[in-house]
Image (spheres, rainbow, N blue to C red):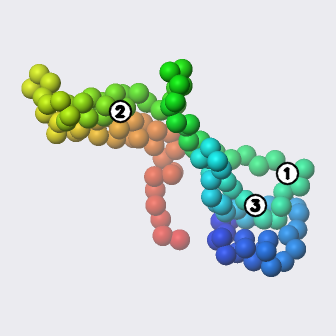
Amino acid sequence: MTYATADQFNNWYLKGTPVSGSPTYYSFNGTSSDGDTLIEFYPNPNEANVIRINYISRGLDLVDVTDTYAIPSRPIILLAYAKAVEERGEDGGVGSGPAYAMAQRSLSDAIALDAQKHPEETIWEVS
């Protein structure tokens, strides 16, 4: 599939009669009420088409005690610790600067571990 701009989709769907068939174009069209990305296709897929999409589903806000998140916990713990040190002062000789640095390194490590799963997504080329 080929990416198409929002203007192209507006022309296809608002100025003409949309057709059905095997999709050849896609575009992102905002987010749903729970924060997930909405994707649209052109032509409209019919029942015979199965579209497989890899995407990042944003987690819901943590509201209840039983709510969980699907990201590495270490960066969260270290950032919470850094904020506590910043608010209350040093903790056994660790200032807020080094505490934030630990949290940042932990987050960078988590991103690097995820990036190695699909290295082709980290290569940027001019097209």
**Mark drawn on residue 32:** none
Q: Residue 121 appears at what percent x and percent y?
A: 51, 51
Task: Compare residues 45 and 99 and report the one nearer the observer.
Answer: 99
Q: Is mark 3 on a helix, strand or loop?
A: strand
Which residue corresponds to mark 1? Answer: 49
For marks 1 and 3 on the same chain, the one whose residue lies earlier in the sequence: 3
Above/below status of 69 relative to 46 = above
Q: Residue 49 appears at what percent x and percent y?
A: 85, 51
Q: Which of marks 1 and 3 is in front?
A: 3
Residue at 73% across, 59% down:
40
Residue at 73% across, 46% down:
52
Q: Which amino acid type is shown beneath numbered disc 2?
A: Pro
Above/below status of 78 relative to 114 = above
Instruction: Give the image quarter of residue 38.
Output: bottom right
Label 2, label 1: how many angstroms apart (C-alpha)? Answer: 40 Å
Which residue corresponds to mark 2? Answer: 75
Numbered circles on residues, count: 3
Lateral position of residue 20 relative to residue 69, left or right: right
Q: Which amino acid type is shown beneath numbered disc 1?
A: Asn
Which residue corresponds to mark 3? Answer: 41
One can see residue 82 in this view: no
Q: What element carries label 1?
A: loop
Q: Is mark 2 on a helix, strand or loop?
A: helix
Q: Residue 31 appears at what percent x and percent y?
A: 62, 53
Lateral position of residue 33 relative to residue 13, left or right: left
Q: Residue 16 appears at what percent x and percent y?
A: 84, 77
Q: Which amino acid type is shown beneath numbered disc 3?
A: Phe
